[in-house]
Amino acid sequence: MRFIIRTLAAAVALWVAIQFIDGIDVDAPTNSARYWGVLLLVALIFGIVNAIVKPIVKALGCAVIVLTLGLFLLVINAAMLYLTSWIAGELDIPFHVDNFYPAAFWGAVIVSLVSWLLGLLIPDKD
């Protein structure tokens, strides 16, 4: 159940990024079932990318992360969003991020902020 809630939260975060950032698009009729289905699929891909690829990249870039006082994590988050866009394109899912900067960078910032805020609302089962 928690996985489903986190995927829905990621879909909402991606939707917010699409609303505010030019260059992040879903090529489906807005607010249709297909549109929300695409967002859910992209959120699922984004979650898988963040679970598998992101820890490897963070481990390899640990020195750079420390040297930049953590600011390099913004670049890593943008790379994960851009990679998600590429994977979606390869799977013929109509989600596209135009470029790394500014679209993927600022989109990743928005997705991170919205996910963090939604995470505050989702209770942990401790």
Image (cartoon, rainbow, N blue to C red):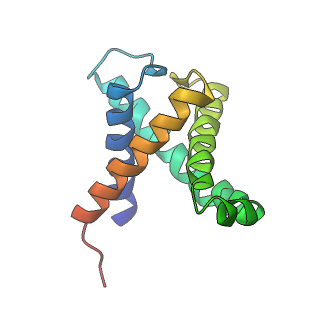
What residue is shown at x 40% (from left), y 26% (from top)? 21
Say if 25 sits above or below 9 in the image. above
Drawn side of residue 105 relative to residue 31, left or right: right
Drawn side of residue 74 relative to residue 40, left or right: right
Say if 14 sits above or below 115 in the image. above
- Hey, which quadrant is residue 37 in on the image? top left
What residue is shown at x 39% (from left), y 41% (from top)? 110
Say if 94 sits above or below 47 in the image. above
> At which x and y percent is residue 75?
61, 46
> At which x and y percent is residue 25?
45, 21
- Hey, which quadrant is residue 35 in on the image? top left
What residue is shown at x 53% (from left), y 46% (from top)? 46
> At which x and y percent is residue 52?
65, 58
The quarter of the picture where the N terminus appears is: bottom left
What residue is shown at x 33% (from left), y 14% (from top)? 29
The quarter of the picture where the C terminus appears is: bottom left
Which residue sits furthest left?
121
State the residue in front, 107 or 34.
107
State the residue in front, 101 or 97.
101
Drawn side of residue 28 relative to residue 101, left or right: left
State the residue in front, 46 or 19.
19
Say if 70 sits above or below 76 in the image. below
Q: How many marks?
A: 0
Which residue sits furthest bottom?
126
> At which x and y percent is residue 38?
43, 30
